[in-house]
């Protein structure tokens, strides 16, 4: 049950997940601003780990899909809620951005220049239709981060079907292995065909295991929520420790470690088991940033591009991060109030009225 309190979205005992969303969004902004890159090996490792913020979002999304689907009256009402949750803001920000790029007042975004795409009707319609991953030249060309949104929509549609077959832990693990194998095969052939790994990088199949891990975390949380075994605290401590290790040290497999740690926290964290962690993740600033995290994710790269064109960014990565983050939070608050929250309310009313 979602409760709106001014700007904060409140979910009860899973409020800490909103805090995790805040961390994920901040990580993504950090890598795109080079936040701590000037602070030696550790600073570079923390900054580079920002790309795994998307993995956190995907795991959380898998959890949300499983919960929403379980609570929904039927598949149609579930999908309606999920699509209206994510699409209107995406369409709005994409429309604003493509108008800016087509106006000729700004340089074209990096991937648009790199892959030779244009801010034209074809590009726009591919994004509006949520199938931009079918043409890697446009998949990430407008916002610089939007490749992940059609991926989410794809799994909104398909994950409930997979959950029908993956009803046990054994089957879920088997499905994850199958998805990883399919991803490897697909990546090989796409790279052979196009001479680049980008088509596979921005294609939905490659992230199915993260959504499935997130969905499994929902069912495991339901199963273990009332368990008082002290081992649950050990799992939480291990997950937090490994999460920080993966942030601080650059090594192969950081993506998988961060995703698994996110899932463990989703399964295990309750106020009784991790009071300090829960308090840290559910402070008002964390809940606020988590509430507007979707807007932060979509808007920040556009902010960076415009500020670079206007020569308004400082040379220091830290100051660049602070400037970009500050401007992005202000704009994201506005888009949350003007677009995201009203459309979320409309989606809930639409589903309720259809009952």
Image: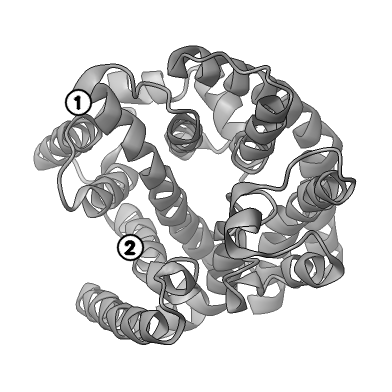
Measuring from the top left, give residue 293's x and y in whole percent: 59, 36
One can see residue 270 in this view: no
Q: Earlier in the sequence, mark 1 or mark 2?
A: 1
**In screen coordinates, is 273 left or right of 299?**
left
Cα distance in 3D space between marks 1 and 2? 31 Å
Residue 66 spot, x, y in % from top left: 48, 64
Labels 1 & 2 near each other (Cβ < 8 A): no
On screen, residue 70 versus residue 330, left or right, reads left
> Does 1 appear above or below 30?
below
Q: Could you say which is closer to the camera, residue 176 or residue 347?
A: 176
Q: Residue at x 72, y 31 (%)?
A: 306
Quick one: label 1, few (<14), some, or many (20+) residues within 10 Å? some
Q: In the picture, residue 119 is in which quadrant?
A: bottom right
Residue drawn at x 81%, y 52% is: 98
Q: Mark 1: which secondary structure?
A: helix
Q: In the displayed structure, does residue 338 sit left or right of residue 227?
A: right
Spot occupied by residue 61 in the image (x, y as percentages of width and height): 49, 56
Q: Is residue 211 visible?
A: yes
Residue 141 falls in which quadrant of the image? bottom right
Q: Residue at x 20, y 25 (%)?
A: 41
Q: Which mark is residue 299?
A: none
Give the quarter of the figure containing the C terminus: bottom right
Q: Which residue bears the numbered disc 1?
A: 41
**Side of 219 where 60 appears, left or right:** right
Graded by Cα atoms within 10 Å as few (under 14), some (14 to 19) or many (20 or more), the crowding at tag 2 reads many
**Residue bearing the label numbered 2:** 213
Residue 205 position within the rendered picture, expressed as x and y whole percent measured from the top left: 43, 76
- Which residue occupies the foreground of this view, 110 or 353? 110
**Vertical side of 336 occupied by 142: above or below:** below
Residue at the image position 84 percent from the left and 45 percent from the top: 96
């Amino acid at each position: 049950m979602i409760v709106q309190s001014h700007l904060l979205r409140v979910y009860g005992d899973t409020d800490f997940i909103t805090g995790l969303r805040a961390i994920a969004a901040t990580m993504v902004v950090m890598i795109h601003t080079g936040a701590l890159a000037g602070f030696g090996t550790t600073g570079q490792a923390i900054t580079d780990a920002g790309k795994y913020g998307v993995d956190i979002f995907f795991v959380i999304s898998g959890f949300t899909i499983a919960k929403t689907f379980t609570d929904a009256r039927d598949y149609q009402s579930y999908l309606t809620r999920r699509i209206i949750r994510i699409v209107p803001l995406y369409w709005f920000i994409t429309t604003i951005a493509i108008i800016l790029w087509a106006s000729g007042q700004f340089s074209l975004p990096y991937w648009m220049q790199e892959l030779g795409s244009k801010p034209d009707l074809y590009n726009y319609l591919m994004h509006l239709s949520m199938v931009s991953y079918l043409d890697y030249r446009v998949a990430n060309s407008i916002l610089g981060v939007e490749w992940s949104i059609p991926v989410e929509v794809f799994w909104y549609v398909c994950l409930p079907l997979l959950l029908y077959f993956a009803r046990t832990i054994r089957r879920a693990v088997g499905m994850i292995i199958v998805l990883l194998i399919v991803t490897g095969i697909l990546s090989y052939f796409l790279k052979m065909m196009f001479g680049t790994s980008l088509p596979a990088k921005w294609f939905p199949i490659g992230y199915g295991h993260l959504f499935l891990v997130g969905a499994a975390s929902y069912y495991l949380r339901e199963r273990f929520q009332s368990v008082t075994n002290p081992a649950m605290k050990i799992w939480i401590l291990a997950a937090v420790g490994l999460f920080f290790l993966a942030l601080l040290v650059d090594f192969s497999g950081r993506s998988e470690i961060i995703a698994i740690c996110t899932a463990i926290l989703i399964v295990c964290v309750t106020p009784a088991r991790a009071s300090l962690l829960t308090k840290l993740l559910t402070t008002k600033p964390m809940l606020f940033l988590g509430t507007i995290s979707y807007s932060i994710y979509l808007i920040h790269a556009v902010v960076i591009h415009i500020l670079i064109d206007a020569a308004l960014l400082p040379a220091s990565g830290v100051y660049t991060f602070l400037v970009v983050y500050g401007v992005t939070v202000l704009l994201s608050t506005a888009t949350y109030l003007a677009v995201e929250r009203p459309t979320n309310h409309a989606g809930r009313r639409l589903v309720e009225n259809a009952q």
